Image (cartoon, grey):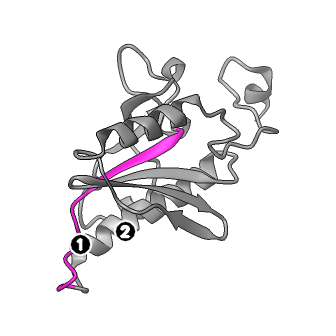
Amino acid sequence: GIKLASCGTRPDLARSIEGERKPKPDMALFRPGLVPACGVPMWCDQLVAVVVTSPIPSSAPDDADGFDDAYDIITRVELMFAVQQRFAVFTLLVVQRHCHLIRWDHAGFIITDPIDYFVDWRYTADVLSRISQCADLQLGLDPTAHRLYPSDLEYRCM
């Protein structure tokens, strides 16, 4: 299964250096065991990033908000590659009544056609159900790497 939760603070130094505007809070799909009953799950434990944004008007190609939204998505994916052992990152992009599933790898990305989740709610539910049934390998996590926790001996050696 999966749970949607807020990710807490993104460990992103580039945004704090830029400092012009506060980034939007991050949400993601997590394995249920990684979402604490009280508090926020760790940012680095997310399986699928969820980004909710407004449409970029085609009449304003120099729109700063549209650039900031794209910058946020790209830097978030870049950071997920940096803090997790991954060969692919999946992002669920929600723009008003439409959503896209994006698969990122080190060569680029592939994006689905828009899905109107209000009209095609069964299709959207099926996509989310299939994501919840995927193994970590299918969601882009490297099967040869394993997470170290503070209680692990290897963690203390780092």
**Looking at the picture, does residue 35 appear above or below residue 79?**
above
- Between 129 and 44, which is closer to the camera in this rendering? 129
Residue at 74% x, 43% y: name it: 142
Left or right: residue 66 versus residue 18 is: left
Verify CB contact (< 8 Å) between mark 2 and mark 1. Answer: yes
**How far across and how far down the image is residue 40, in percent?**
38, 27
Which region shows up in magenta?
A: 47-60
**How far across and how far down the image is residue 4, in percent?**
38, 31
Residue at 39% x, 68% y: name it: 71
* Tag 1 secondary structure: loop
**Looking at the picture, does residue 36 appear above or below residue 86?**
above
Q: Residues within 10 Å of mark 2 (few under 14, many from 20)?
A: some
Left or right: residue 114 versus residue 105 is: left
Residue 47's disc is: none
- Between 100 and 30, which is closer to the camera in this rendering? 100
* Tag 2 secondary structure: helix
Magenta stretch holds residue 150: no
- Foreground mark, 2 or 1, reads 1
Residue 90 seen from this side: yes
Magenta stretch holds residue 50: yes
Residue identifier under label 1: 56
**How far across and how far down the image is residue 68, in percent?**
30, 69
**Gap in angstroms between the C-alphas marked 2 and 1:** 10 Å
Q: Residues within 10 Å of mark 1 (few under 14, many from 20)?
A: some
Q: Quadrant of the C terminus?
A: top right
Residue 8 seen from this side: no
Q: What amino acid type is highlighted by mark number 2?
A: Ala
Residue identifier under label 2: 70
